[in-house]
């Protein structure tokens, strides 16, 4: 193996055992081809220890900094006077080299013998990779770092696999049919609208039907088609307040499809579409007693959460019993809160103002 250049080991003489461990590390690295430079291999350099340290640090490819509490104290200039002159000198040289390199560090490598010694890595090196050589894996990582080789061989870059085609889970005609299955809605008998509010979650706008099985089927079909959160907001829900000729005072709830949203979903699925859509919708007229606050409370909570759940419920024929089925709820962001005065002749909600015959 070709030499990578010298590796200088900087450390403090904490005690006899520590000095021995440093020597063992250096010997092990040298046995495996790393040309370590250590003061223990020298007697008395002719140029003196300060110049010897300066030259060895300057010429070294890497400098291993064996971090201990004593080493940290001396490098950081916190040692009591008269102790550790060698490490203090090395510390000054290391600081100067990092400064001269524009704070970039490719040379100085923190090494620890115990995991707890991580806190003794000098401040300028705390952002660098460090190596705990008390384990074989830690030693191996240091060894490959000194060789400037990763432990794992990077494989050649392969070819990108083709992206899967966008699946179309349903017949395209499904995108263009409205959410109202006339026969199913006739069987379900939509008889009321209810609201449920809780201060910690979005409110519920409920459609109360007489027939539970048909009501479940309606919402199960919607789940299959729109998902749990109606991403495209295809289900169009509007609440229209104000007096309507021929109707008792109250408000109307209009359920249908948003044609623009349906066409967008159709086109996003990869289909071309240039025709107009004809959609079937359903209306429920609510005539609450004077002073009722259910709708006002729903609007207040919707304003806060900006979302709501559209869910079915089952109501008894005498209108006295209601069983919500919130587990079938669909999470939505859009509900149209309107007044009859803003609805024009060509408005989607204009059907609310026409004379109609309730399904019985």
Image: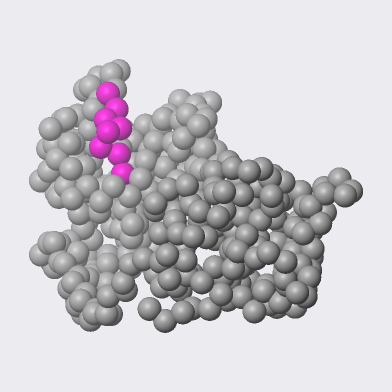
Q: Between residue 220 and residue 155, name the one nearer to us.
A: 155
Which quarter of the rendered picture does the C terminus lie within? Answer: top left
Is residue 327 part of the magenta span, yes or no? yes
Q: How many marks?
A: 0
Picture residue at 54% right of the left edge, 44% below the top: 114
Picture residue at 28% right of the left edge, 80% below the top: 157
Task: Name the quadrant containing residue 350.
Answer: bottom left
Q: Between residue 347 and residue 109, name the one nearer to us.
A: 109
Picture residue at 23% right of the left edge, 27% below the top: 314
Task: Name the quadrant containing residue 195.
Answer: top left
Here the colouring is one colour
Residue located farthest toward the right when viewing the structure as drawn: 81
Q: Between residue 177 and residue 62, name the one nearer to us.
A: 62
Q: On the rendered structure, is 89 left or right of 192?
A: right
Q: Where is residue 196 in the image (x, y as percent from the top left)?
A: 41, 30
Task: Name the quadrant containing residue 192.
Answer: top left
| Placement of 299 over or under 147, stated as above or below | above
Judge whether residue 339 can be spotted in this image: no
Picture residue at 27% right of the left edge, 23% below the top: 323
| Placement of 233 over or under 209, stated as above or below | below
Q: On the rendered structure, is 165 left or right of 338?
A: left
| Placement of 144 over or under 219, stated as above or below | below
**What's the magenta region?**
323-330
Q: Position of residue 38 (x, y in %)?
A: 61, 64
Q: Where is residue 77 in the image (x, y as percent from the top left)?
A: 82, 54
Judge whether residue 153 can be spotted in this image: yes
Which quarter of the rendered picture does the N terminus lie within? Answer: bottom left
Q: On the rendered structure, is 166 left or right of 204?
A: left
Is residue 341 part of the magenta span, yes or no? no
């Amino acid at each position: 193996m070709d030499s990578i250049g010298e590796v200088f080991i900087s450390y403090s003489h904490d005690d006899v055992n520590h000095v021995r461990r440093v020597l063992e590390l250096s010997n092990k690295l040298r046995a495996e081809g790393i040309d370590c430079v250590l003061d223990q291999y020298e007697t008395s350099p002719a140029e003196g220890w300060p110049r010897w340290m300066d030259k060895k640090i300057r010429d070294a490819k890497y400098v291993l900094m064996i971090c201990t509490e004593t080493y940290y104290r001396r490098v950081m200039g916190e040692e009591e006077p008269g102790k550790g002159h060698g490490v203090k000198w090395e510390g000054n040289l290391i600081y100067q080299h990092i400064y001269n390199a524009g704070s970039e560090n490719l040379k100085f490598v923190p090494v620890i013998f115990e995991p707890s010694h991580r806190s003794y890595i000098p401040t300028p090196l705390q952002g660098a990779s460090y190596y705990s050589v008390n384990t074989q894996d830690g030693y191996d990582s240091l060894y490959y770092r000194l060789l400037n080789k990763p432990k794992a061989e990077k494989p050649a870059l392969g070819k990108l696999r083709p992206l899967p085609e966008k699946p179309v889970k349903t017949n395209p005609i499904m995108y263009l049919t409205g959410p109202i299955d006339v026969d199913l809605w006739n069987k379900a008998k939509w008889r009321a609208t209810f609201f449920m509010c809780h201060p910690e979650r979005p409110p519920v706008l409920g459609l109360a039907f007489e027939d539970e099985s048909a009501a479940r089927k309606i919402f199960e079909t919607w789940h299959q088609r729109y998902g749990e959160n109606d991403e495209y907001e295809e289900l169009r829900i509007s609440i229209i307040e104000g007096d309507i000729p021929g109707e008792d005072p109250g408000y109307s709830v209009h359920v249908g499809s948003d044609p623009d949203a349906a066409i967008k979903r159709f086109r996003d699925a990869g289909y071309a579409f240039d025709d107009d859509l004809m959609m079937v919708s359903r209306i429920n007229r609510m005539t609450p007693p004077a002073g009722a606050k259910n709708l006002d409370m729903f609007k207040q909570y919707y304003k806060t959460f900006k979302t709501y759940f559209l869910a079915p419920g089952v109501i008894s024929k005498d209108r006295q019993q209601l069983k919500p089925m919130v587990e079938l709820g669909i999470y939505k962001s859009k509900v149209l809160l309107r007044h009859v005065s803003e609805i024009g002749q060509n408005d989607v909600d204009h059907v609310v103002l026409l004379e109609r015959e309730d399904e019985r």
